Amino acid sequence: MKGIKIVTIGGGSSYTPELVEGLIKRYETLPVRELWLVDIPKGKEKLEIVGALARRMVEKAGVPMEIHLTCDRREALKDADFVTTQIRVGFLAARAKDERIPLKYGVIGQETNGPGGLFKALRTIPVILDICRDIEQLCPNAWLINFSNPAGLITEAVLRYSPIRKAVGLCNLPIGMRMNVARLLEVNADRIHIDFAGLNHMVFGLNIYLDGKEVTDRVLDLIASGEAGDTVKNIPDFQWEQDFIKALGILPCPYHRYYYQTKQMLDEQLKDYKRNVTRAEVVQQLEKELFELYRDPHLNIKPPQLEKRGGAYYSDAACSLIDSIYNDKKDIQTVNVRNNGAISGIPADSAVEINCVITKDGPRPISVGELPVPVQGLVQQIKSFERTAAEAAVTGDYHKALLAMAINPLVPSDAAAKQMLDEMLEAHKGYLPQFKGLQSANASY
Amino acid sequence: MKGIKIVTIGGGSSYTPELVEGLIKRYETLPVRELWLVDIPKGKEKLEIVGALARRMVEKAGVPMEIHLTCDRREALKDADFVTTQIRVGFLAARAKDERIPLKYGVIGQETNGPGGLFKALRTIPVILDICRDIEQLCPNAWLINFSNPAGLITEAVLRYSPIRKAVGLCNLPIGMRMNVARLLEVNADRIHIDFAGLNHMVFGLNIYLDGKEVTDRVLDLIASGEAGDTVKNIPDFQWEQDFIKALGILPCPYHRYYYQTKQMLDEQLKDYKRNVTRAEVVQQLEKELFELYRDPHLNIKPPQLEKRGGAYYSDAACSLIDSIYNDKKDIQTVNVRNNGAISGIPADSAVEINCVITKDGPRPISVGELPVPVQGLVQQIKSFERTAAEAAVTGDYHKALLAMAINPLVPSDAAAKQMLDEMLEAHKGYLPQFKGLQSANASY
Amino acid sequence: MKGIKIVTIGGGSSYTPELVEGLIKRYETLPVRELWLVDIPKGKEKLEIVGALARRMVEKAGVPMEIHLTCDRREALKDADFVTTQIRVGFLAARAKDERIPLKYGVIGQETNGPGGLFKALRTIPVILDICRDIEQLCPNAWLINFSNPAGLITEAVLRYSPIRKAVGLCNLPIGMRMNVARLLEVNADRIHIDFAGLNHMVFGLNIYLDGKEVTDRVLDLIASGEAGDTVKNIPDFQWEQDFIKALGILPCPYHRYYYQTKQMLDEQLKDYKRNVTRAEVVQQLEKELFELYRDPHLNIKPPQLEKRGGAYYSDAACSLIDSIYNDKKDIQTVNVRNNGAISGIPADSAVEINCVITKDGPRPISVGELPVPVQGLVQQIKSFERTAAEAAVTGDYHKALLAMAINPLVPSDAAAKQMLDEMLEAHKGYLPQFKGLQSANASY
Amino acid sequence: MKGIKIVTIGGGSSYTPELVEGLIKRYETLPVRELWLVDIPKGKEKLEIVGALARRMVEKAGVPMEIHLTCDRREALKDADFVTTQIRVGFLAARAKDERIPLKYGVIGQETNGPGGLFKALRTIPVILDICRDIEQLCPNAWLINFSNPAGLITEAVLRYSPIRKAVGLCNLPIGMRMNVARLLEVNADRIHIDFAGLNHMVFGLNIYLDGKEVTDRVLDLIASGEAGDTVKNIPDFQWEQDFIKALGILPCPYHRYYYQTKQMLDEQLKDYKRNVTRAEVVQQLEKELFELYRDPHLNIKPPQLEKRGGAYYSDAACSLIDSIYNDKKDIQTVNVRNNGAISGIPADSAVEINCVITKDGPRPISVGELPVPVQGLVQQIKSFERTAAEAAVTGDYHKALLAMAINPLVPSDAAAKQMLDEMLEAHKGYLPQFKGLQSANASY
Ligand SMILES: [Mn+2]
Ligand SMILES: [Mn+2]
Ligand SMILES: [Mn+2]
Ligand SMILES: [Mn+2]
């Protein structure tokens, strides 16, 4: 290829400047000739604001990267080399419902692996599978790099229900966990290596190394003694029970609090709920402020305020991945891919989040064998949920959706599952065409 | 063998008359020459009451079966053909603690697969492993048939930590479920066949047949429409959410309510807790009444009141199993054995509860392949719990015990896990010698 | 069903009288109303001879079983309950080629798992898959019971490439091995039970029981000491190396001689080859004699000469299987079915030959876990061969066929594989329509 | 560590100068402070010749690496960082027997995975396991890097029967195959990447990349068209059947000729056998000449004649591996390690030869999932052989050794297996103390 063509679907996102910055920074080794930002008509205004900023950034940096803006996805995809997807079907308003409706029933919404995540998946998977069909026709050699959430569940759906094999799911959590360990040890992050394995937002650091020497216990002791939070922006950092963290013996991710500290997390969320605040609403306000900034015709760099947004490292992770694929770097990155036996007990054809060697031929997972026995069960439970949810998203089968809801570890009863499901199907019905027939059938139950 | 020798450890149990009745009934094909009832000195009075009744029953029936009573386990085991274990370490008082302490923390006790079951396992497994060592020395060809709870977890421990291979765990739930299906369909139970697979108290009926023809959906429809409870004595039969039961597509066991109807079950138990009643206390009263009856020197049959006790079919299941092994019957029974690949995804060397062909060489599991995806996760989670709990029971490792507690699906937080664990370790300390050192170490945390 | 309808494809076979005898014998519990004998026009004469004999047998027995003769397979299949297939595409003339062409290259032909078996599979699988398509349309609830060879490979193809799930492959070897063990121990065969597991014509007796007590070593000692042959009609019974049979520790089947005594078997076959005699030719002569007998209008029973034919117990096995399915007998029979985890290391969706419980819902395999390490490799090698051969049969891919030939353990080189393949493709071309295009392509290599 | 300590057992080997050269070349990043060359008293003369040369090489290069020579292995091992083993129990004379005795019976000896390899394993494994025990006591943090043959089988034995987990088996074949592909494509070898997976001397190149782009078919076409041999010194490069190599679709290793071209290889070896020449004898002559050169006090570099010896890249592979472990390089190398799920179907705890990321914590295998179906069988067969042979080597069990011999794919009959085994046990008896008792028992058979 002479010059790379990247297509970013959901290009009007507030994250885009980070992506543009990442590509500019790497231009020498990763010569992107064309960056296509694609969005839906409803997002056209944002697309143009972000696109204009992107052009100013490119100009300032003096790199010959063309920025194309379009609402015609198929036009954009033609002969692309890489396609990134960062879409939010139903906008932040839908996320607010994903979080608030469950809380009404005393249940954590959890927009990725919880009841909220189920609905985000039901809305998002059909769109992603449409994109996959377009890719197959228009740019069959392209790599699809998805960072729409729930990234693991979406990767599962792509692997099982699309013909695309060059697909990777991306999350910033592993990078964030590494950064956090570096902070704890007061060293530079590039001296830290962590053996990551698990599922998206359910990933564990099995071993932690400083300069190649294992320091897992030292890090866990620091965490046990409460010296530092290990959290992401949107998850409160309750102190872990110190004996629990030592007993666990491996590094949990921030989202594990939902499962190992369910009660505290729920109480916290119910407080916010009663004050009428959810993460979605906080984010909506942040977004508004960001776009105000982006409009400024004098702004020609990524504004530092973006870091607060919570998605730090996401686009950087994407640029890194593209760089390593394009340049056959064979470095190690943590991504969501076909398991292929790397984690025992998870089906070979299911998605896992795991350390991979990144080659021109894509990521190759590094085998970890069995996860520690005490965490196998929870990981399997989320995998059961993901597989059932993916099937529901593709088939629009009411009963599959109900099962996915009821088996989710955050959902405390079959009755609550049914009530939440029905209310959420109704609330999101504009974005769930696949459930149309069934919902009315369901109405007559 | 000329005449069979059976040793029943925990022979002073109120269940023993059912066992004796079962042996008498089968005497022609299963000629038991000696039945040894063994108990600990503290249980001697009950042993003698039950033993005297057993002798009257045998005499009445006119079968030449010798009843031996002893507190010397090793004397009894010499050259035994079958050893049954129905022990309750710490008596019903311990069970009451297993149930009540968790409720204090707003957590279901659940005396088999919950926090209560964890402690029952910690108390019972060392005793069972002692018995295994005795069997190895004194009657290495004997079959060990355990129906002490938690029967699945104990089988797991025996398979992993004892040299005994001729070991089977037994539960009356599958028989009860079959009876219940027969009631629902208004047919005789012997026309019903169910493909059972899962774990103890976590077993599913994958397919249900009437006269060999599948009627699974018909049965699930009946259950969904609330026509009949499918419950055991000690579990309230809340109505299943009808769409859930249809979506599940397989028959759950009564204990599944703890996981799929957690909220309702907890609310119900908290009500009892506040009224100061737990199942343990109900049972204690029933036991007292039963022993009053057993004392009656005119009683020479199993009194019908025993059926109320909740353990119906237990001893019958044991007699059936012994009969089929002894007579190489090759019929199908549902028992807890080494998985051996029969359920995909569960380790080959772990215990499962599954339909087996019963031969003179023991039970052979019938392969079912993969469980339905939506239930795999929960089954794996209980298996993680069982394996971790078994390791804690054998090693007396405080951290393993904490992990077992914290990963149990009924336990809502690491903090609650730690508090319950500490209080329960203290409450049961007389029966947990393996934790002695560690507990004091723990005190200084 | 009121009265059973059985369709026998290849009904003009000399084996049919055994099948008819078996059905008559079981009439009381297995009331067959209609037996349809189907054959191709070229086999019409034999069909009529055999059909007339069948009618005389039924009349003599006084059972109201209708015998229908037809060359219209689809007419026959309508609403069938059981379909048995015993076809020989290309007749015995093709078998002679299967055996003789390899010998020309110094290679054993072996008409089931060897180069000869590869060609038998290439000819037979497309026909069987056609039958499967007819079954799907005309009698979707019917059971397909195939005893055409290579029965394992054909079952593999049916499981992977047809929509039919109610399919069983049948071989008389396990019954024969049991009979032989009974002879060795001088006891009645019904006192012997053997745990069979492996692949078709690659099955092992893992444990042998007399009245439920293990006697494996005793039987192997008898075999080691050469007291008796354990062979089938068509395999010479060279003495096993006594230390080898003890070291093996499990009972091999007669066909194992091809792999563990390759040299002796080859030498023997080369002798016959030079004398211009192969098994196919011996069988051709036997067949001719049998049909002479069958023509006799006074014959109204199965003639005893049929036993010599080599297929003893085949039809009996089929009748037994049909009986147990129809009557939900839950007895144990050894058949070829989907593995489903019963043998570790073989794919769950591959065919294995294994002890099953026979229910109305079909055979359920009994788990054996891992085969002994030393035999795993050979079993896997034959499974690799079977899977590759099945793919070649379905796709008509020349390279797949070459691979199947070259990886067969009897084939000593890539060059010999290619030569045999080309000569056999030519020799059988009339029966290999799926290879048509490719063969001419190949000609230009 | 301040300066690295390497211990080379079998240090008197003619390969040692290559190792010394490799360490000198890498001194800057791999500062070896002490290199201990260890040999047995019988090899003392060679040890001193090689040791003197090593000292002259170090001096000429001007690096401060101490060369220690000793016959006291335990003295050497104290606090070692890396231990390499390149031993030949029984010297080249034993190898000659390994090769010649089987040929007497018309069987290929094959000194690694054949009957000869079995005996090399029986002689070598007990010595390696002794070394492991010493390592455990004297330098428990050291890495054991074995390149004694059969390297895969020895790794299997170390993983299963020693407490050492930091153990890697090394072969020069993957490097050689990469070099050869580079030659075929006329490019520099560092532009070629191959996905290797399989077992030692049974490894396949699954995909071949040039500058990150797949060129597998192009390479196979070149090989099919006979443009170049892909062979090692000791294996004749018969032309592969071109359709076979295309059908295979992956790159075989030179040793695959033994299995896919058995006939040609045997004929070739029988020719040599009749001329009284085997590879062992060729090597003996080469060795003699090399040691003549090494004696020369003016020689202070690795003499170019060593390249002819056949072990090219071996020591280089070892230096590379040590370098990457020491410096946590995270590059990809092909080594023999615990499978850990990387190749589906091979036990997680068995040795495989596979691409690994080399970290300070050792090699981590990159998952490949399933091998292509047609090669699975052969790989499994060699794994069966390796596991059985390893067990025989450790237990000294005659029957296990017989089984290992009989199931080897090069051995054509149980009778030949027994004869070869008995003759070879006798021929090597001085080096097989573990078989002592059994052999005499065997004598009385
Ligand atoms: Mn994420
Ligand atoms: Mn129970
Ligand atoms: Mn057969
Ligand atoms: Mn090698």
Image: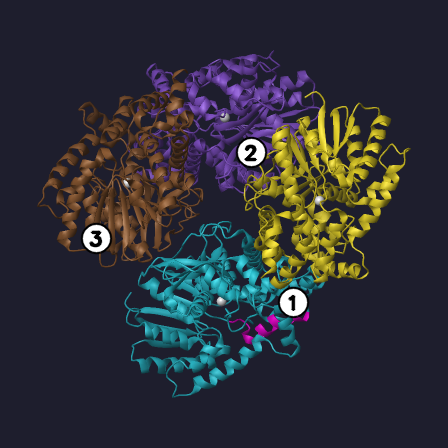
Chain colours: A purple, B brown, C cyan, D yellow
Using the image, name the chain to which the residue with label 2 belongs.
A
Q: What is the residue that sits farthest to the left in this orientation?
A: B298
Q: In the rendering, at what x and y percent does residue B20 appear?
A: 20, 48
**Local secondary structure at mark 3:** loop
Residue C91 lies in the magenta-colored region? yes
| Residue B183 appears in the figure | no
- Residue at numbered disc 1: C107
Mark 1, residues whose alpha carbon is within 10 Å: few (<14), some, or many (≥20)? many
Q: In the rendering, at what x and y percent does residue B136 appear?
A: 38, 44
Gap between marks 1 and 2, in whole Å?
49 Å
Using the image, name the chain to which the residue with label 3 belongs.
B
**Which residue appears at 79% of the width and 38% of the height?**
D44
Are the residues under marks 2 and 3 on the same chain? no
Tell me where the magenta segment starts and ends, as one range: C88-104
Using the image, name the chain to which the residue with label 1 belongs.
C
Residue D45 badge: none
**Local secondary structure at mark 2:** strand
Q: Nearer the viewer, residue B361 or B222?
A: B361
Mark 3–mark 1 CB contact (< 8 Å): no
Residue C269 lies in the magenta-colored region? no
Q: Nearer the viewer, residue C186 or B186?
A: C186
Q: Does residue D21 lie above or below B445 as drawn?
A: below
Are the residues under marks 1 and 2 on the same chain? no
- Residue at numbered disc 3: B65
Quadrant of the rendered image containing residue B348: top left
Q: In the rendering, at what x and y percent does residue D418 appear?
A: 62, 60
